[in-house]
Image (cartoon, helix red, strand yellow):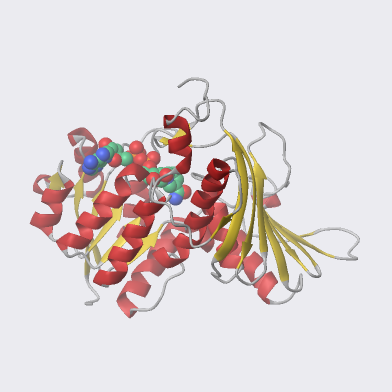
Amino acid sequence: MGKFLRVAIIGTGRKKERADRFGYAMAYSHADAYKQIPGVELVACADISADNGLAFAQHYGLPADMVFENYRAMLDDVKPDMVSICTWMHLHEEMTLAAIEAGVRAIHCEKPMASTFGGARRMHEAAQAAGVRLTFNHQRRYGEPYVMGKKLLDDGVIGELVRCESECGNIYDSGTHFIDMMSKFNNEVPGKWVLGQIDYRTENRVFGGHCENQQVVLFEYENGVFGLVMGGAGGAHPIGAQNKFIGTEGIIECGRDHGPAGALRFRRWGDADWTNVDTHGASIHGPGFIERAIADVIDCVREGRPCQLDSGNAMIATEIIFGAYESSRRRGRVDFPLLIDDNPLTDLVDSGAITVEGL
Ligand SMILES: NC(=O)c1ccc[n+]([C@@H]2O[C@H](COP(=O)([O-])OP(=O)(O)OC[C@H]3O[C@@H](n4cnc5c(N)ncnc54)[C@H](O)[C@@H]3O)[C@@H](O)[C@H]2O)c1
């Protein structure tokens, strides 16, 4: 592929003072990142809201005829080399498949992969079959707490990895970041089985998707490393950090609290106290992670080398997440490969198998 890339955005969002679960306008973060990369040109955008599209175009200096309400028309007319998909997750599958069909060479899509496991699988398989680079914005993989934490692990500071733990509110929306991070620390080894229970009693929709209120999820990777996710208990902290990596000789913790001070620490068995690691002002949320993530995606696209954000890696966490919901539906352990097509949590709600206050 040529070095010069024409990029378009699908789903611009609307910048607002305070982002929330009804709109982060992630497209602006993607566009800011593309703007910094030599040889990458932001050429067009599409949003069903004309106001949102026009405001985005104005912000980035796009001409009016490069603003579309129909993303398929944009794909046909503009023929971008690459698209960023920044809509809510129920649209990721159809938009990814349409972009592949239209002949784009690369797609950077927001997390979570899709609203069903079958959707995630179809996106991954279609991209593989067409030779299209498909990546997901698990940008925290590029953050100092995690990059430096992984280096501590690779340097043998806590010995061999035994178990990855996470406390993440819900496993689907925010959890995709933290379960995906386990994949990074466990060198992208797939899961083997998952056993999970969820509690969903009060309506909780994030970017339109149902998310459980509380969960306990245990799983094993193919290399014998275990994963454990517990959280969402309304202020209680059963794990005590967003990610905890337990080795044969100690523990690494990332995200004990939301500021840089609690971003990374480790303790070896026998140490009198924890060692706090200076993450140069970065918390587990930023700054600069999306810029670095997108810069790496572009490098990987240009050089034709694998990227840690590739869909194959994202599938590892996605199988665990939907597998956990499936385990709750089946009331038993789920062995992988996960063969379901739907979203078991949505099915539990829609079928009335669980009663959710507010629905
Ligand atoms: N990586 C992260 O840390 C992070 C943080 C927040 C949100 N997200 C993810 O980003 C994604 C987008 O969330 P957001 O909050 O930025 O969304 P948003 O609501 O701010 O923007 C989405 C836009 O998509 C548009 N849209 C809807 N249907 C469309 C269609 N058919 N064609 C074209 N445009 C359409 C909407 O009009 C809206 O402007 C979600 O999947 C969310 O989970 C990721």
In this rendering, the answer to whether 222 lies above or below 49 is below
Q: Nearer the viewer, residue 332 or 200?
A: 332
Q: Residue at x 11, y 49 (%)?
A: 73
Can residue 306 be seen by looking at this rendering?
Answer: yes
Can residue 171 be seen by looking at this rendering?
Answer: no
Could you say where residue 125 lies in the image, as x and y percent from the top left? 32, 65
In this rendering, the answer to whether 292 lies above or below 91 is below
Could you say where residue 102 lies in the image, as x and y percent from the top left? 15, 60
Left or right: 10, with 300 as reference point:
left
In this rendering, the answer to whether 16 lies above or below 342 is above
Q: Residue at x 49, y 44 (%)?
A: 173
Quadrant location, ligand no. 1: top left
Could you say where residue 179 lies in the image, as x and y percent from the top left? 56, 55
Q: Residue at x 19, y 39 (%)?
A: 54
Return the residue found at the far top: 358
Q: Nearer the viewer, residue 105 or 93?
A: 93
In this rendering, the answer to whether 145 lies above or below 90 is below
